[in-house]
Each structure stands twice: as C-alpha cells, then as structure tokens.
Amino acid sequence: MFIDRKQQVAIIIIAAVLLFTAGHRVALRQSGPKDSAVDANPVVAEGSSREISVHVSGAVQSPGVYKFTGQARVMDAVEKAVPLAAADVQGINLARPLKDGEKIEVPAKAEAGREGRVSSGGKTVTSAGPARVNINRAGVRELESLPGLGPALAERVINYRENKGFFTSEEEIKNVPGIGEKKYDQIKGRITVN
C-alpha cells in the first residue's frame, strides 16, 4: 500500500493533535483542583461543606429561602418547599445544579379551557378570549398553547428565563432564539409578564 505525501502529512498532524490532547489531559489531572479555573457562578462541588441559599416561590406550600450543602439540585429545593398539586414541576429543569443566591419559581399548571375573568365595578365578567399566559411562570404545556409555539420553542423560553431571569416586558420574549417579530405578532395579545 502506497501513501502519498499529503496523506503522510495528514496522519502526522492527526497524531500530533491526539498526543497534545492526551498530554494536556494528563497535565490537568496531575495539577489537581487547586490549579483549575474558578467558575464565575460556582456550583457546590460534591462533598463540599460550603453552604448556599436559594429562594423558592410560586406553586409551593412553603415558599422561602432554603439552605443546602453538597451537590444540591433544583429538585431538592422544590421538594423542600413542597410543591402544590397545581404545580407544573415539568416546566422547570429539576436536574440542574443549584447556584447560590438564585430564585426558583415553580409554575402552576395551565387550566384547560380557562376563560379570562375581569373585575368591573364589583362584578366579575367573563371575557370571550382565552386567558393570557404568564411567560414568567408558564410551564411547557401552557407555553405550547400559544399560537406557533411548539415544544422546542417552549423549552427555549423556559431556558431563557432560567438563565437570564424573568422577562420584564412582553416584547423581551423576542430575545428568545426562534421568536422573531412575526411570531411575536401572533402571541402578543396572549402573553403577560404579571
């Protein structure tokens, strides 16, 4: 079998990259955790005695601030606050590690066929249109009820909310990848941040 010069060069480059990668990994293992970079948003390492505090609110029996040590997850905080029967725990990422100082908002499940109610002069009037979806509290199923939002976009809205914090205006939802001006025009009368 004959290997031409280009193939020889390619094999040498691949071998060099593999050797460099293996050497880098060995060096990282030998240097230990004292030389590793510090994360700007630290997550409690397994077995750590460092205490973190998180605020749990929303559809829970006991909203408040909870303290954890070790490798705590969102599900630990939600369980401590005791989710209500109306809680949509599927609307949040329960497996995500907790970060010190964060707030976890447990959304309530959407009521199917719910009508909007408006108080007018002491009387409760039922509106003909559907209730607005609170994009700061809605779970995946409730977000999917919006026109043009499927499971993937609903997950992006929740991920955006978990990483960037609550939406401060309805228009801010346009910052979520996949929701542009046209999609926003379809849902703007159906969403709220209050």
Image (cartoon, grey):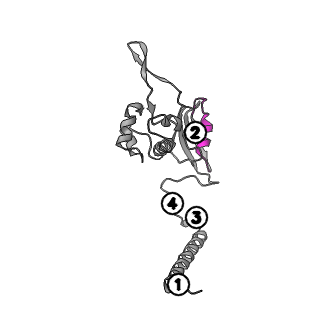
Q: Earlier in the sequence, mark 1 or mark 3?
A: 1
Q: Amino acid at mark 2?
A: Gln
Label number found at residue 8: 1
Q: Position of residue 14 (x, y in %)?
A: 53, 77
Q: Would you name the residue on which mark 3 appears?
A: 33
Quadrant for the N terminus, please.
Answer: bottom right
Label 1 or label 3, whichever lies nearer to me, is 1
What span is colored magenta in the figure? 71-87
Q: Earlier in the sequence, mark 2 or mark 1?
A: 1
| Above or below, comparing residue 62 to residue 94 in the picture | above
Residue name at image x 46 percent, y 42 percent: 157
State the CA–CA distance, disc 2 to disc 3: 35 Å
Label 2 or label 3, whichever lies nearer to me, is 2
Label 2 or label 1, whichever lies nearer to me, is 1
Labelled pair 1, 4 in contact (Cβ < 8 Å)? no
Would residue 22 appear left or right of 161 to someone viewing this image? Answer: right
Label number found at residue 90: 2
Q: Would you name the residue on which mark 4 appears?
A: 38
